[in-house]
Image: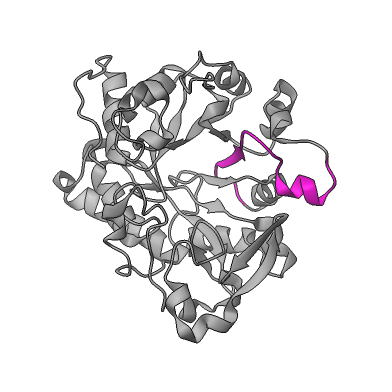
Amino acid sequence: MPVRNPIIIAHRGASGYRPEHTHAAYALAIEMGADFIEPDLVMSKDGVLIVRHENELSRTTDVAVHPEFANRRTTKMIDGRTVSGWFTEDFTLAEVKTLRAVEPLADIRPRNAGFNGQFEILTLRETLDLAQLANERLRAVPQAYTNADHRCIGVYPETKFPSYFASIGLPMEAALVEALAEAGFGSTAAPVFIQSFETANLKELRRLTDMPLIQLINDRGAPYDFVVADDGRRYADLMSPHGLQEISAYADGIGVNKALIIPRDPDDKLLPPNSLVEDAHSVGLCVHAWTFRAENRFLPAEFRHGGMADGGDLIGELDAFLAAGIDGCFIDHPDLGVRARDAFLSHSRPHDCEPYPG
């Protein structure tokens, strides 16, 4: 499975430049040339798919300063962890719409924090409509976008905590497939990937749709549906040749923690790539790696410049992963992803690229 044109997936939108999962983050990602925008999905009390990275709201919204919701603060067990705060499943969509997004990484992204309070919380349908509107404009005014001659903006939703939501009577799968179809993303030809860290969730989605599915794999732990079922397997088992063959029966690819492709040594520098990409390709699975961020806190040591909150050479890191054969990357700074891919495909890695300004 040779890499012809690795895709750039705007991780929670252009979240390196705007608060994540906001209209501004997605719109900027599209302007910057991203191929896909990535909405993480949780459920509201009234069964609406809304776009947040987790169902606890205080990290990414201003819910804590809403006195009318003070009595909603509670403690729950979510996927085996005790979590305190305000939860989407306790709020109707109308109530969620009174909240505003805030930057969760304000210590290293103070510019993003300057947008706190400006953007409402999106539903999945609103995000899909945003992508479709961009595609309509792309066809009508191609000069308004980067790489317009061959682009179609795709969506790459992730179901968050599907076992948990099913356990409280808010299953996600049918609602997601229905929403995609209603917004014009329902065909197998549509630019869509659906991703999940759980396996049962993906198998149910496979029963409902032929759209491409991606099994997410972390560098530690296990899919929570394995935990619920007392299945002793862990993510590491999914990466074995047998595990990858099993995944290929219900999914079209894997989305993996980048450390599982190119690990780091004790000095936090990149080691040679392992065989995971080749192993996945051998059973017909594409490989999308996550998450690429420009700040030094997240970069391998050899690509850092300045302090940990400063920007380093993300293009250099991406070049190593593209050379390892990945088929796509989840990235907070999609403009840098586009530059890295274009340079890689032209075989002219730009050594004089300026660092991300922060």
Measuring from the top left, give residue 168's x and y in whole percent. Answer: 72, 69
Measuring from the top left, give residue 46's x and y in whole percent. Answer: 58, 77
Residue 49 to residue 14: above or below: below
Residue 78 to residue 75: above or below: above
Residue 339 to residue 18: above or below: above
Please tell me which residue lies in front, 327 or 105.
105
Measuring from the top left, give residue 173's x and y in whole percent. Answer: 63, 58
User: Is residue 27 at least partly visible in the picture?
Assistant: no
The type of colouring in the image is one colour
- At 61% across and 39% down in the image, what residue appears? 215
Residue 211 shown in magenta: yes
Quadrant in which residue 281 is drawn = top right
- At 46% across and 74% down in the image, what residue appears? 63
Measuring from the top left, give residue 41's x and y in whole percent. Answer: 53, 58
Residue 31 to residue 2: above or below: below
Please tell me which residue lies in front, 166 or 194.
166
Residue farthest right in this picture: 230
Indicate the quadrant containing the C terminus: top left, top right, bottom left or bottom right: top left
Magenta residue span: 209-231
Q: Is residue 121 left or right of residue 346?
A: right
Quadrant in which residue 161 is drawn = bottom right
